[in-house]
């Protein structure tokens, strides 16, 4: 898994989603739905940058751990931000019940990174 490539692509998608929300959706969906969209964009971008951080740490932290953290962040983005994007544009309320599963992936990724930091290569 190439975390630099995936993180960079993910960041680009997050920026595009943010621009789409600000310009394309602003007059199409209600303000509360736009706030939901913005929350998805914030977490999407934050975890795209986190993937790049994890890629930068790959030489200092066990490779298997960085790969797992990267996968957790990617799955988290897909579930968390993806469900919020869909909720914002469709209004399907049950999508909000899926969102926390993505948050759990984020938390697991950050936790694994914290544990791995205790095993830094020297």
Image (cartoon, rainbow, N blue to C red):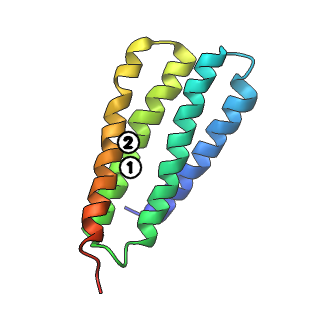
| Circle 2 residue | 76
- The alpha-carbon separation of the residues under discs 2 and 1 comes to 5 Å
Asked if 22 appears above or below 15 in the picture, the reply is above
At a point 42% along the width and 34% down the height, the residue shown is: 80
User: Looking at this view, is 96 or 11 the one in front?
Assistant: 96
Asked if 8 appears above or below 33 in the picture, the reply is below
Residue 77: name its quadrant. Answer: top left
Residue 93 rendering spot, x and y as whole percentages: 43, 12
At a point 40% along the width and 48% down the height, the residue shown is: 74
Do the numbered discs 2 and 1 sit on residues whose CB atoms are within 8 Å?
Answer: yes
Which class describes the residues within 10 Å of circle 2: few (<14), some (14-19), or many (20+)? Answer: many
Residue 21 rendering spot, x and y as whole percentages: 67, 30
Q: Secondary structure at mark 2?
A: helix
Please give the label number shown on residue 56.
Answer: none
| Circle 1 residue | 73
Asked if 96 appears above or below 12 in the picture, the reply is above
Say which quadrant the N terminus sits in: bottom left
Which class describes the residues within 10 Å of circle 1: few (<14), some (14-19), or many (20+)? Answer: many
Residue 102 rendering spot, x and y as whole percentages: 36, 37
Say which quadrant the C terminus sits in: bottom left
At a point 52% along the width and 49% down the height, the residue shown is: 46
């Amino acid at each position: 898994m190439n975390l630099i490539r995936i993180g960079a692509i993910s960041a680009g998608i997050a920026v595009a989603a943010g621009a789409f929300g600000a310009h394309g959706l602003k007059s199409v969906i209600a303000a509360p739905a736009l706030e939901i969209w913005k929350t998805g964009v914030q977490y999407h971008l934050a975890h795209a940058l986190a993937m790049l951080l994890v890629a930068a740490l790959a030489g200092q932290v066990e490779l298997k751990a960085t790969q797992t953290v990267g996968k957790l962040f990617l799955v988290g983005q897909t579930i968390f931000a993806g469900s919020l994007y869909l909720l914002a544009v469709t209004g399907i309320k049950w999508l909000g019940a899926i969102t926390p599963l993505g948050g759990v992936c984020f938390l697991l990724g950050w936790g694994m990174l914290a544990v791995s930091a205790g095993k830094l290569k020297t």
